[in-house]
Amino acid sequence: MNSSDILIRKAQRGDGEVLLSLIDALANYEKLPRPDAAARQRLLQDTFGDRRRIEVFLAELAGKPVGYAIIFETYSSFLALPSLYLEDIFVLSDNRGRQVGYRLFLHCVEEAHRRGCGRMEWAVLDWNRPAIDFYERFGARQMKEWLCYRLLRADMERIIQKEH
């Protein structure tokens, strides 16, 4: 197979089960729990519903879905431009080394540029050396001066209850 056998396309409503199976494969790779039934429904609603919060691109190799990327826009007040956030990018392990990840990432870069984004951002797990090396080959830089913080929904609920 060569790179011309790779197709990157926007996910359609009928791709829901394929998307969920790829997300399950990413969860397995990262040794995280798979989305539960309610989360699976939200993923499909947020991807294909009336108020779409995320966009999904599927990577197909010789007609078979083998990877995906989830993106959404954020905004930079200092640039006064949108930023493209890459939430997930994943290729099934049997299909790595075939340019699928490269083409999927390049598609996201092109999408950010097409939208007039001032930057594209994502997070990488510190143990995922293959992904870090992959991004650095593109010239991506780790943002050392910015620390990533997170509130979980339970944390938000605790804060709201405490403040009211």
Image: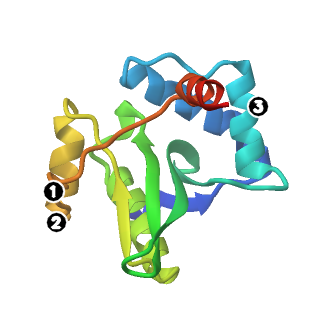
Instruction: Give residue 70's position: percent from left, percent from top.
Output: 53, 50
Mark earlier in primary sequence (3, 2): 3
What's the mark number on residue 136? 1
Left or right of 118, for residue 46: right
For the image, the number of numbered tags is 3
Task: Kindly state the secondary structure of the residue where label 2 is placed.
Answer: loop
Q: Mark 3: which amino acid?
A: Gln
Q: Are marks 2 and 1 in contact (CB under 8 Å)?
A: yes
Q: Are marks 3 and 2 in contact (CB under 8 Å)?
A: no
Residue at image position (68%, 31%) is 164
Relative height, residue 63 to residue 7 (above, below):
above
Task: Identify the residue position indicated by label 2 in the image.
Answer: 139
Asked which quadrant contains residue 117, the reply is: bottom left
Relative height, residue 91 to residue 25 (above, below):
below
Residue at image position (47%, 33%) is 151
Task: Identify the residue position indicated by label 3 in the image.
Answer: 41
